[in-house]
Image (cartoon, rainbow, N blue to C red):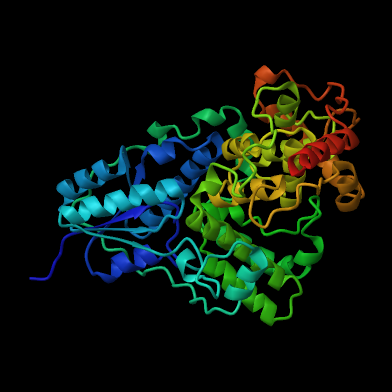
Amino acid sequence: MPDASPILWWVRRDLRLTDNPALAAACEMGRPVIPVFIHDEQVEALGAAPKWRLGLGLEAFADSLGAHKSRLILRRGRALDVLRALIAETGAGAVIWTRAYDPDGVARDKAVKAALKDDGIDARSVAGHLLFEPWTVETGQGAFYRVYTPFWKAVRVREVPEPMTAPGTIPGPDHWPGSDDLGNWDMGAAMRRGAAVVAPHACVGEAAAQGRLGAFVANRIAAYKAERDFPAAEATSRLSENLTYGEISPRACWHAGMRAMGEGKAGAEHFLKELVWREFAWHLMWHSPHIATGNWREGWDAFPWSTDDTAPEVTAWKRGRTGIPFVDAAMREMYVTGTMHNRSRMIVASYLTKHLMTHWKVGLKWFEDHLIDWDPASNAMGWQWVAGSGPDAAPYFRVFNPVTQAEKFDPKGRYLDAWIAEGRQRPSDTALSYFEAVPKSWGLSAGDRYPAPVVSPQAGRERALAAYEARSG
C-alpha cells in the first residue's frame, strides 16, 4: 500500500506559496500536507518590531492558505515537542522545512532532524531562503569568501533556477488538528502604541511583496544606482522587509533584475549586487557564526568601546535627539516606518561607534528591537562593517561626517524636513508621527527645542581617531 500519511510542512521564514521549495516538495509526495507554524523560544526572543511584523505576516499567510483550501496550524512550545505531538495527533510520517543558516536556527534544526529520524520520521530540510547555499561558494583554495567583490564575481555568472509557480492545490487531511488563535499570542504586545503608527508603512504578504517588486522594476530600477544613496528619494526596492519573512523569494527578485538588465535598465546590475550583498552576509554567518555575537576581526576585543547603553549620549542617540539632524532624522524614520534607508543606517552606526565610542553591539540590539526588516546576518555584518571590526569593513579611520553627508545626499533638506519637527512652523505629518510612535515616558513633544549636539562631528572624529591610533600603536 502506498504511504498516505500526512506531511507536516514546518513553516518558518517562508510565508509564500510561489517559489517555495519546501511546499513544492511536500505537495509532490501526493499526500496530505499540514502547514504548521511553531511559536518556539526563537520566536519568543524576537525584538518588538520583528515579532509584531511576523504576526502580521502569519495572518496574511493564513488567509492565502485558506484561499487554497488549506489552513495554517499554530502551536506554541519547543519545536521538537510540538512536532512530536502533531505527529502523534495526525499520524504524519514526514516533516519538511526551509533551511535556516543562523547559529541558533542551525542548532535547533540539527537536533530536531536527528531526533525525528530516530523516531522513524522522514525529516528533511531544503533550500529556499537564499540564492546559493553557503557551502557551495568557495575560493580557488576551497575556503569561504571574506571579501564581497570576489564573492560577487564568483556568483554573478551562476545559473539561478527560475522561480516555481504556486501549487494548484494543496492537499489537506480529512481531519485537521487543533490550532492556537493568533490573537492570543499577542505578538505586538511590546510595540504598544507604536504599532498603529508603523502599520500603514508595512507591506505585508506575498501579493503585496510581488506588487512592490513589480512597481520597483517598472518605475525605479533604471535610476537605482544613481539615486539609491539619497534617502529622500523613492529610489530603493524596500524588499528587505519581504525577503526577511520569505514573502517573496530571492530567485524572484534575481530574475526580475536579470530581465531588467536585459532590457538595458541602467540600475539593474546594481540591484543584483545588493541581492548578493545579502547572500554574502549569510555566507559569512554560516561560515563564521561568531559574527552575530562578537568582533569578526581578531584584535578588536580590547578596543575601548563603551558598553553602557544607558549613557546620556547613547540615550540621545536612541531617541533621535543627538542634535545632529541627519542622525536624528534616520532614527525617527525607523520609529515611524519600522525601516531605515541604507545610507542612513551607515550614518547612525558610524556616529554611535565612532563619534560616541559606543560598542556596535549596543546599536545591533537596538536595531534588532525596532526594525521590521530585521535580518540577523545583514544586521550583524552591517554594524561590524561600519564599526571596523567586521569583514569587508570600512577602515576605522573612515569616520562619516553626518553634516557633510547630509549636504551631499540630502542637499535640499527634504529628508530632514520629513523627520525633524522641532523648530519648524509647519512640521510634516511624518515628523509629527514620531511623537506618536515613541513611548510617552520619553516626554517628548514637537514643541520642544531642538537639542545642541551631544558630540560635535569634529570632536567625535578626533576622539575616534585618537582611540584608533592608540590601538594601532
Which quarter of the rendering shows the N terminus? bottom left
In the rendered structure, the answer to whether residue 186 lies left or right of residue 159 reads left
Pick the residue in front: 134 or 64: 134
- Is 220 drawn above or below residue 262 in the view shown? above
Residue 236, percent from left and from top: 71, 58
In the rendered structure, the answer to whether residue 378 lies left or right of residue 304 reads left
Furthest residue toward front: 473
Give the residue displayed 61% in from the left and 57% down from the top: 239
Pick the residue in front: 76 or 352: 352
In the rendered structure, the answer to whether residue 143 lies left or right of residue 460 reads left
Which quarter of the rendering shows the C terminus? top right
Residue 423, percent from left and from top: 90, 28
Pick the residue in front: 462 or 122: 462
Residue 458, percent from left and from top: 90, 37
Furthest residue toward left: 1
Give the residue displayed 74% in from the left and 53% down from the top: 394
Q: Is residue 202 visible?
A: yes
